[in-house]
Amino acid sequence: MAQTMVAVITGAGSGIGRASALALQADGYDVVLAGRRADELEKTASMAKAGGGRMLAVPTDVSNPAQVVALFAKTKATFGRLDVLFNNAGMGLPAGPMEDIPIEKFKQVVDLNLTACFQCAQEAIKIMKAQSPKGGRIINNGSISAHAPRPMSVAYTATKHAITGLTKCISLDGRINDIACSQIDVGNADTAMGGRMKAGVPQANGQIAPEAVMDVAHVASAVRYMASLPLDANVQFMTIMATKMPFVGRG
């Protein structure tokens, strides 16, 4: 009998996290839903498809180290293993001049977008290297901002550039334990966070202009594909974006 695959998804209460959780659950994964809002996690769980895997909502602030440890302990205790971690939770700050950003706000973005991804990866690796069969896959949400910044987005952009370095290090150091690491860079998914692009956002020339968006289901489909690969194959980096968004040629 085939081993049931287990996934942990952070930021699973909305947007890309919710869509990806539902896609994996439909494929038969048991999915652990992590996020700060218990009601939204339960809403995600209530959308599970019949015949798919189980869903477990674990309210978690991934910027809190103790809660991260508890999340992965709960995953192991409930399902016995971990095959996929999707490091998806993240945040940005309102657009504003770099010199006006309070250092506490900058650190808050670093704690969630970078440090939490590192710690979640640590806890996932501990499980993946010790289980039988060993190994697993970590997918980091990098964003288009891992390549090019939007105006006045230094905290978000700096952390997403750092995610690329984290992804490469996990890929390199994880090889010995059959742990693959991928990065998905998303541009303008039509979610609560990305949907604002339709109304108009600052451009590099100082203008405000609307941008094209895409259905979040396409992002979930990409995550689903990345997760489906055997551990001897890996999508190292994938960019999925609204075709007409101003990324190529940005600036």
Image (cartoon, helix red, strand yellow):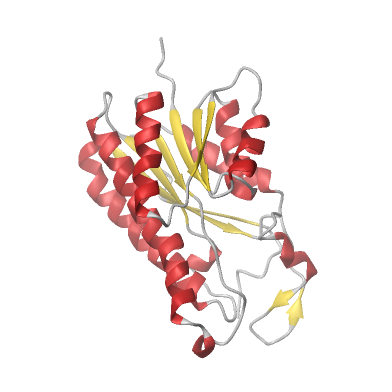
The quadrant of the picture occupied by the C terminus is: bottom right
The N terminus lies in which quarter of the figure? top left
Location of residue 77 with respect to 42 vertically, above or below:
above
Quadrant hosting residue 246: bottom right
Q: Position of residue 39 (x, y in %)?
A: 64, 42
Residue 69 is situated, as x and y percent measured from the top left of the image, at 34, 44
Q: Is residue 34 above or below residue 203?
A: above
**In the rendered image, the vertical position of residue 38 relative to residue 112, given as above or below:** above
Q: Nearer the viewer, residue 47 or 67?
A: 67
Residue 217 appears in the picture as rendered: yes
Mark count: 0
Q: Residue at x 64, y 47 (%)?
A: 14
Which corner quadrant of the image does residue 180 belong to? Answer: top left
Q: Position of residue 27 (x, y in %)?
A: 56, 26
Residue drawn 60% across and 27% down? Answer: 26
Farthest top residue?
Answer: 1
Q: Percent position (x, y) of residue 183?
A: 44, 52
